[in-house]
Amino acid sequence: MTRAEGVITRAPASPSRTVQRVTIRFADKRTTLGRRVVESVGNHMTLDRDHPESIPTLFAGLSDAITTQTPKDRPTRLGLTVIDYKEVSGILTKPKGFMAGYDFTINPYSGCAFGCSYCYAAAFARDEESSSNWGQWVTVKENALDLLRRLRRNLSGKSIYISSVTDPYQPIERTLELTRDILRELVHHKPRLVIQTRSPLVARDIDLLQQFEVVQVNMTVTTDDEGVRRAFEPGCPSNQQRLDGIALVAAAGIQACITMTPLLPVIDAEAFADTLLATGVRRFIVQPFHPKKGQYSAGTKDTAIPLIRRFQWTHSQYQAVRSVLSEKLPQLGEGNTGFALA
Ligand code: SF4
């Protein structure tokens, strides 16, 4: 009989279930042993690794630490954001248009609490009211993990983009860990993965991201100025938090990229480039607002237009800043070609 000393390192709440998966970290490797209703981190234990049926006995000794999470306990509001939960028919989407270079996109959530003023994803909301209330609601795809687990398709080598119309690391992710669960499941499929976010929370999942053979984390940083950031992206983490987050990702040996998409008013392009380089990131993407109906890009949310006017940010100013960035940054892609997985 093999016995081993282990520590419960993580007991993530799956938003779709009342049970949770328990992962034990051994000295030699990380092992998932089963799914139990448990919320306990850091409890040392001795267990029989060859006989997982011994686990219930083990949990009996942890009764004080055990809590159950029922659907009733799931958050239905986070700050000003209303959270709801919905089963969806699929979790892998064949992208079109801008993301057509990828085999699939995965969006764990619909809606996005970050609510950026320019967010094109608002145009894909289910109805007009949801589009105009963008930023105030999030729908959790509660069966996302089950759908992935039941998947018969071979995803090996397929390129997957997480996420195209939501932020996978928006605030509710800290509680639900749905994106984390999805990553844990995807590791076995060996896809080529790109994560796109505006949140330093992505650094929480470095341990999983390191297990992918091909992975890139894109962090969006749109300006060097907190006043500009607050005007356009009031619900998002600060510039510095994002820079710190992507610096952690890069330092962990994971391919990292800073996406300036769209590039917003920049105060000092030279200093901005130096700040970006100080993160250790060496890959960058820049993109302007595209004209649409004589003004801004297809799908760019209308709320950004008066802001752009207020800051008097023109395409020629964009070009001047881009020119400085392209001189100082080693790999600067532009537009959708920049988004291709290296
Ligand atoms: S973080 Fe992305 S998906 Fe969320 S509101 Fe901003 S642009 Fe839209």
Image: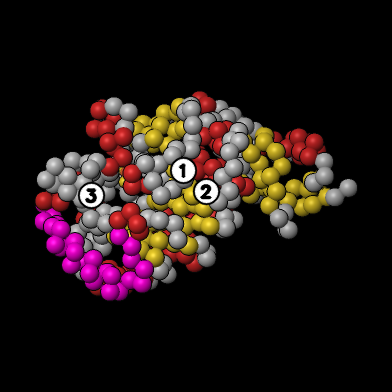
Which of marks 3 and 2 precedes in the sequence?
2
Viewer-side residue, 218 vs 337: 337
Residue that label 1 marks: 104
Q: Give the secondary structure at mark 1.
A: strand
Kindly identify which residue carries mark 2: 158
Q: Is residue 254 above or below residue 302?
A: below
Amino acid carrying label 2: it is Lys
Q: Position of residue 246 (x, y in %)?
A: 42, 60
Q: Are marks 1 and 2 in contact (CB under 8 Å)?
A: yes
Circle nearer the N terminus (1, 2): 1
The x, y position of residue 184, in whole percent, is 58, 46
Q: Nearer the viewer, residue 261 or 270?
A: 261
Q: Secondary structure at mark 2?
A: loop
Sequence-first disc among 3 and 1: 1
| Mark 3 CB within 8 Å of ligand 1 | no
Q: Residue at x 51, y 40 (%)?
A: 178
| Range of residues picked out in magenta | 310-334
**In the image, is residue 322 part of the stretch drawn in magenta?**
yes
- For the residues labelled 2 and 3, the Cα–Cα distance comes to 34 Å
Dot 2 and dot 3 residues touching (CB under 8 Å): no
Residue 99 percent location from the top left of the image? 37, 47
Identity, as a three-letter code, of the amino acid under mark 3: Phe
319 w.r.t. 91: above or below:
below
